[in-house]
Amino acid sequence: MKNDTRTYRTTYLAAIIVCLCFLIGGILFVMILAGRSEEDNRRYLQDAAKQNQVTLLKQVQGDFQTLDGIAACIGSSGEEQQVQLRGALKTINEKNTFLRMGYVSSDGIADLYDISGITLKDVDLSESDFFLRAMAGERVITGALIDMVSNEYINYLTVPVYQGESVIGVLCAVNASSVYREIIDAPVLNGKGYTNIVDQEGNLVIRTLNLSGDPIRLSEMGVFEDGQLDQAMALLSGETGGQFLYKTEGVQQLAIAEPLGINGWSVISVVPRRILWENYGLTIGGVALIIVGAFAIFLFLLYRQGRIMSKSNAALLHQAYDDPLTGCRSFQKLLLDAEPLTSQKGEKKWAFWYCDLKKFKYFNDLLGYQTGDRVLQALARLLSEDEIPDALFCRVSADNFAGIRPYQDKSELEQWFRTLPVRLYETEPAAASSRMRVELCMGFFCPEADDDSLSLTESINRANMAQKTVKGQTGSRCGFFTRQIREKILSDAEIETRAWAALENGEFVLYMQPKVSIQNGGRIVGAEALSRWISPDRGMISPGDFIPLFEQSGFIVKLDRYNFELACRWMRSYLDAGNPPLNVAVNVSRLALLQDHFVEDYTAIKNRYRIPDRALELEFTESVVLDDDGVFLDTVVQLQKNGFICSLDDFGSGYSSLNLLKNLPIDVLKLDILFFRQGTDVTRERLVISHVLAMARDLNIRTIAEGVEEEDQVAFLRRAGCDVVQGYVFYKPMSLADFNQLAAAGLDLNLP
Ligand code: C2E
Ligand code: MG
Ligand code: MG
């Protein structure tokens, strides 16, 4: 669950990061687009300024060229001609577009011929700056001046008239300022911008009509903030031009200054700065809209996905955390809920419990699954009615329940357990059916100081172990996890870890328990090879302590094969000593049957030691048969073909099935009569045994009774037709050395 939450959190975080990247990317894109738009428009404005500058320059230079041509003519003529030419200026000007034109003699007096035909006689221009500068050899164009005659704005253009090296007079022309203004009035950026001509002092020498108000100077065109005017003025006296900003009526304006190349004037094109964005405005808006739209769709999908996930999560959690049959918690949910309670270091002592319904499988078989389910539901109800706060429980699986309970004293726990079956029979009478009564067995684990590091699962596992120790006892029982169980766990762990080394060190040896034929006087007819672990530290360890562990770990397959080889090796030496073949039975775990090449492997060993056919017997326990009838049956047939005798071990002590005898072509049946001794009625017991023996005989199956401890049992078995007895009544398992001695002494027992 924690993992799931972490995964969802990560997913959402990732999604939010993606969203943010998306948004930042979008904003950057729009900014780049906007930046590019401004850049493009700035360039466009610059081009417009340049264009105006070029056109204006062409106009002015064209005017000067005209004047230069006429001035050259006048200058190069003789005196008389000069007078004539000066007089002819009126006619000449009619062909030009100047408003007025005339020759200014060196004293500054001029006759100016107006295009309207009027001649302005003896105009004194001697004080005029444009006259004086022309006399000094300069070509001059003035800024816009008010014309005394037409009251319109005009510009004077003057060029010197040379005779040889010296200036003899000035040719003067007047142009209506509108000539130049028309050029600068050309629309800039769809008419949103305008152009002016400014001199180096910042005076507007030619002003566009587009300019509102009546500014005379650049500084009056708008509001210049800190340093902006200085920056603009610096551009006017520079050679390369540039841009500057100012505001008119709160609107920021961008101005581009381009030197005109005449009189140190500059062309200044101005446009409101926001106009620069407008061209791309639609695109930027569109892109922004797409980004916002996509973002919204993404968020919506994320939200939908989140809802779907949380719904399916809830369904999954329901599946994972609720037990559908009883409605109580699942084991996972118990772990989750118990964790915060038990991890608190407080006053409370916690007991962990594990409960199993004994032989519930049979109860189900006998009374039906529906009744079984009702019993489980009733038990869950009882447990949930528990009045102790914080007590939690769950159904682990099938008929297993587990939980935690706060407690003061262990007797409290026992007391609580004792009420459970009683209450169960009350609430669900079927649990105490006359055919079979449900019994509970429960294990408790009450942690001690040094158990702090145990996890919840480990603690419940310990309760389960305690439960197993009482499972075999009659009636409803409970038990506690004890020091002995703890030691067994440690010992089991040690056994498992030491197994491989022990095998390599030859710590596993064989013991032989002789089998005695009881029908013909009593002869040792064979022996069962039983494994013993002679540990250097722990002494002899009996198979009951390690075989079940090795069956769990799978190591038993190795050990069985090893023991089988030991048995073959002994048999070889026994035969080599000149003895006739003797039946030796070796146990084979059911796990070995699932191995590939099991039959081939065992046959190869048998052949390697040249053991005659039917001398070796393999004992299989019944559990093998239950697991997989088919494999077992095939294996038995093949083994028999390869010269092995096959026997069924512990018949009667496990899940006996008479049906099995019908199907299996087994050679020998080993009856564990220790099992029968659990009953109290000896007559009935013997009746059953005799019938099993009779049945085996009829099926042509030989019989061995093992676990026989008493003489009268032997007598009974003989009467009942049992062939062979293996039990303490004759011999206990003995070392190979002892068995060799026994064999050397002769195998006849001369039984009565
Ligand atoms: P099992 O194959 O049924 O072997 C018979 C067990 O009964 C032996 O116990 C034997 O000592 C014991 N027994 C024989 N007669 C009597 C008697 O009169 N009274 C009592 N109380 N017990 C008697 P052991 O040697 O402790 O072996 C226990 C089990 O361990 C064996 O039962 C067998 O299932 C398993 N085992 C032993 N050696 C091996 C082995 O090499 N491989 C496998 N897979 N299992 C083995
Ligand atoms: Mg056996
Ligand atoms: Mg046995």
Image (tube, rainbow, N blue to C red):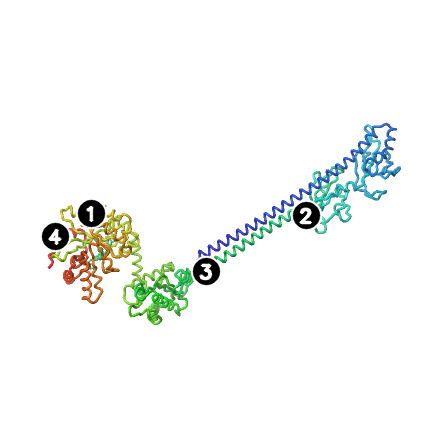
Q: Amino acid at mark 1?
A: Arg
Q: Nearer the viewer, residue 393 or 740?
A: 393
- In which quarter of the view is residue 700 placed? bottom left
Q: In terms of secondary structure, where does tag 4 sit?
A: loop
Q: Position of residue 418 (x, y in %)?
A: 33, 69
Q: Which residue is mark 3?
A: 314
Taking the spot 48% from the left edge, 58% from the top edge, the residue there is: 310
Quarter of the rendering occupied by the C terminus: bottom left
Dot placed on the residue nearer the N-terminal end, 2 or 4: 2
Indicate whether 55 appears above or below 18. above
Q: Of callouts 4 and 1, which one flags the residue occurring earlier in the amino acid sequence?
A: 1
Secondary structure state at the residue bearing disc 3: helix
Residue 74 is marked as none
Dots 2, 3 in contact, CB < 8 A: no
Inter-mark Cα distance, 3 to 4: 77 Å
Residue 275: mark: 2
The residue at which mark 4 appears reads as 746
Q: Earlier in the sequence, mark 3 or mark 1?
A: 3
Find the distance from the CA under tag 2 to the CA under tag 4: 124 Å
Question: Residue 105, position in %: x, y?
Answer: 86, 33
Quadrant field for ligand 2: bottom left
- Circle 1 residues within 10 Å: few <14, some 14–19, many ≥20: some
- Can residue 612 be seen from the camera position used here? yes
Which residue is the site of mark 1? 569
Please name the amino acid that badge 3 sits on: Ala
Q: Is residue 106 above or below residue 282?
A: above
Q: Nearer the viewer, residue 389 or 662?
A: 662
Q: Depth-wise, is mark 3 or mark 1 nearer the camera?
A: 3
